[in-house]
Amino acid sequence: MEEERKNIIIFPKWKDNLEEQAKKAMQENQFDLAYDYFLKLTDIGVDSHEVMTGKLICMMELNMQDQAEEFCEDLIARKDQYFAYYVHIYSTLLFQSSKYKEVMYLIEDALEEQNIPDHIAEQLRHMYQLSSELQEQDDKQSYIEIEKQLEEAMKEKNDRKQWYMVKRLLQLKTKTDKAIFRKMLQDPAIHPVVKTAILEYYEKLLPSKPLQIEKFNLMDTLDMPASDSILPTSFFTGVTQYLEDVQHHDPTKYQMIQFILERFAYVFTPFLPQKENYQVFAESLNFYVSKSFQLMEDGDDRQSSLMKEHYLKMIDVSETLYAAILDV
């Protein structure tokens, strides 16, 4: 298409006539007709600011929401002298569609640019503030609705739905320390993966009071502001340091091990192997992957007796529990 445009000879009078007809149609509020004219102009490669803006206005008047948003993104990507103008139009378009998060992301990125005139920057900041306030209101209403669905999921004993609802709450700006979440953390009937999602929620909230959590008949108390990440980096690096040989000689196998390690941590956190057991746990992971994917060489079966059987069982449990929620 681009090559065809380059080969089209644009006659000035023809172009001027199309632009005049488009302008006249817009003045008469015949936006569908004006859009056809602008479309012809852009199809032959005319991309002046006036034509692009006219086409965009027609899209907005004709409720071509998706096309208008995509067109705005193309115009913004040019980063030409009209960048700030296009950002203002796009943020207005998103705001009118109640896409407040998108408005805030767009404005945050735009204000990092150096070529935003002061008067437009001020308008964008005002729109950002309004979007933030309206998004907060939406989040509060969504929070109430999702919390009700979470309670229903608990009554139904629907683990997957519980996990999904907690994850939805995690995406909201509004976060509250609710008794139901603390109760779920201590309830042996709640799926371990769901409990990890709740810990992720509290990691964002940073509660003032410690959390009590039960998993696999073990209890622990967590002080979220003072503790490491719920999926501690030190655990991953501590275990994988004993797998460097696998990483160098069999990258594919190493990647499989990493996937299983991440799933294991998500299921069992905060009850993870201690530092002094990282090496034997790494060996267990290596053996588990070799056996599961038939990567073992002749004679490797005898090594299974050297592994901690409880780690192999824990890995197997983590794979089953994780898959029950996430279907992987």
Image: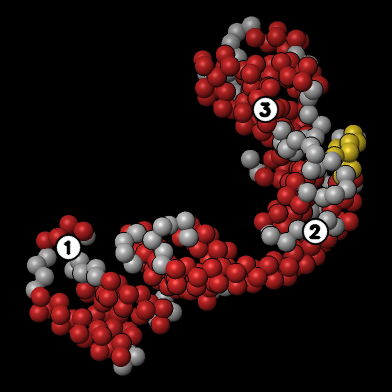
Left or right: 7 as drawn, with respect to 206: left
**Chain-order first, disc 3 or disc 2:** 2
Amino acid marked by disc 2: Thr
- Residue ranking furthest to the bottom: 28
Amino acid marked by disc 3: Phe
Residue hosting label 1: 5
As helix, strand or loop, the secondary structure at mark 1 comes to helix
Left or right: 54 as drawn, with respect to 8: right
What x and y, as percent, mark residue 182? 87, 50
Amino acid marked by disc 1: Arg
Residue hosting label 3: 236
Residue 326 tag number: none
Would you say residue 284 is visible in this rendering?
A: no
Q: Residue 129 appears in which quarter of the rendering? A: bottom right
What x and y, as percent, mark residue 293? 60, 24
**Chain-order first, disc 3 or disc 1:** 1
Q: CA distance from mark 2 to mark 1?
A: 56 Å
Local packing at callout 2 (Cα closer than 10 Å; few below 14, some 14-19, many 20+) is some
Compared to residue 233, the image places residue 1 above or below, namely below
> Which residue sits at x=84%, y=53%?
181
As helix, strand or loop, the secondary structure at mark 3 comes to helix
**Chain-order first, disc 2 or disc 1:** 1
Q: CA distance from mark 3 to mark 2?
A: 30 Å
As helix, strand or loop, the secondary structure at mark 2 comes to loop
Would you say residue 251 is visible in this rendering?
A: yes
Which is in the foreground here, disc 3 or disc 1? 3
> Which residue sits at x=28%, y=83%?
34
Which is in the foreground here, disc 3 or disc 2? 2
Q: Nearer the viewer, residue 89 or 81?
A: 81
**In the rendered image, which quarter contains the N terminus?**
bottom left
Residue hosting label 2: 176
Left or right: 187 as drawn, with respect to 107: right
